[in-house]
Image (cartoon, rainbow, N blue to C red):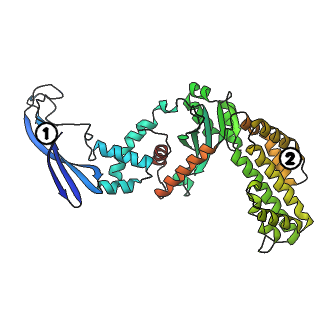
Amino acid sequence: MQVEAVERRPDRVTVTVSTPWQLMGCPDCGVVAPSRGRRRRVLHDVPHAGVGVVVVWRQRVWRCPDTACARAVFFEQVPDLVAARGSITTRAIGWATEQLRREHATITGLARQLGVGWWTLWRAIKPELERLAADETRFGGVTSLGVDEHIWHHGDPRRKGPKELTGMVDLTRDERGRVHARLLDLVPGRSKKAYADWLTQRGEVFRAGIQVAALDPFGGYKSAIDDELADATAVLDAFHVVKLGTQAVDEVRRRVQQDTTGHRGRKGDPLYGIQRLLRAGAENLTDKQLDRLATAIEADDTHQEVYVAWRCAQDLRAAYRARDTTHGRALAEKILTTFHTCPIPEIARLGRTLRRWREAFLAYFTTGRANNGGTEAINGIIELARRLARGYRNRDNYRLRMLLAAGGLTP
């Protein structure tokens, strides 16, 4: 392209460009066509220093001289500059895509900077994202897979479809053992079928390459892993296991609170005053906080149940915090053999739950501490992108945007 003129104004920079003269034949019949002059075509380009940039392309026009040819008039095309019927330059589309991918930008904000409408910009970006999402090679090299669900809308399911989406995340570690999580896909529903169907669609080669499958304690996902990933090791997420222990302590505290006072916790009640301390790890408590905890427990003999439950939850944390996985596994096995016999019903129920998930629970200590933490991090990125956009109405657009923001698509 040749720059013919540059006009600078406080709110806009206008650049007039054209291509050099060249002999041109008709695309259909090949007959040399005479020039019919040029037409002005206004294109929106990447902003510069906070000012909008407009490219005025003096596009060449030809007319086929062959009267038998079906083509009459045809126009010069420069794909590196702009698409055939586009109004946004190829460079601007690439810039906008990177802004969406890395800078947490929104379509509305980018359209405002380019001086175009929302739909104009999205129609230019969407085809490229659809092409990338349809490329099956992006699933290559995945050896560790995470799965989790999230709510993508809070509207009427009859109008917008299921509220839940199941997300699959690549948790494969690099040569240094670090996880660089990336979102692989989002499918509607939260069920065994949703996960199993997605795994089936990926093909036998993909499924055979999965060595570790991390998940939350949801039976539907576990059944899908057992059916479709028979050679993979299912690993129960450490965060959710510890969360189950903390929930059990909360349930014991509330039950004892009701039994001893006949009402929910109120200001001044001993157990109500330590509810936050009971959710913390013992290694994080100061001496003053430990004294508060001891005082509340000693206020009534029935409070000993709360203390025992808290110690059980701390034992569960200690298994995951052990520096040596062999020692951690020994603690976990001791938990499996003792918790279900505890006279405290909430702890006994937790023990039975862990025994049902025995293999997935212990797999944490034999898979290099595999967990679903990367999946939760991806969920955080998804939630941020959804809040920035003030929600979504179209699930297909939502999927493409989240794949781009969470590393699933690489333009």
Q: Residue at x 65, y 33 (%)?
A: 212
Label 2: element kind:
helix
Quadrant occupied by the N terminus: top left
Q: Residue at x 85, y 59 (%)?
A: 307
Name the amino acid, label 1.
Arg
Q: Position of residue 140 (x, y in %)?
A: 52, 29
Name the amino acid, label 2.
Phe
Q: Position of residue 402 (x, y in %)?
A: 49, 46
Vertical order, 217 against 63 (above or below):
below
Q: Residue at x 16, y 31 (%)?
A: 70
Query: Going by the image, does 3 lie left or right of 292?
Result: left
Between residue 157 and residue 306, name the one nearer to us.
Answer: 306
Q: Residue at x 29, y 52 (%)?
A: 47
Q: Which residue is mark 1?
A: 60
Quadrant location of residue 364? top right
- Specify the label residue 339 is tagged with: 2
Between residue 327 and residue 367, name the one nearer to us.
Answer: 327
Residue 359 visible at all = no
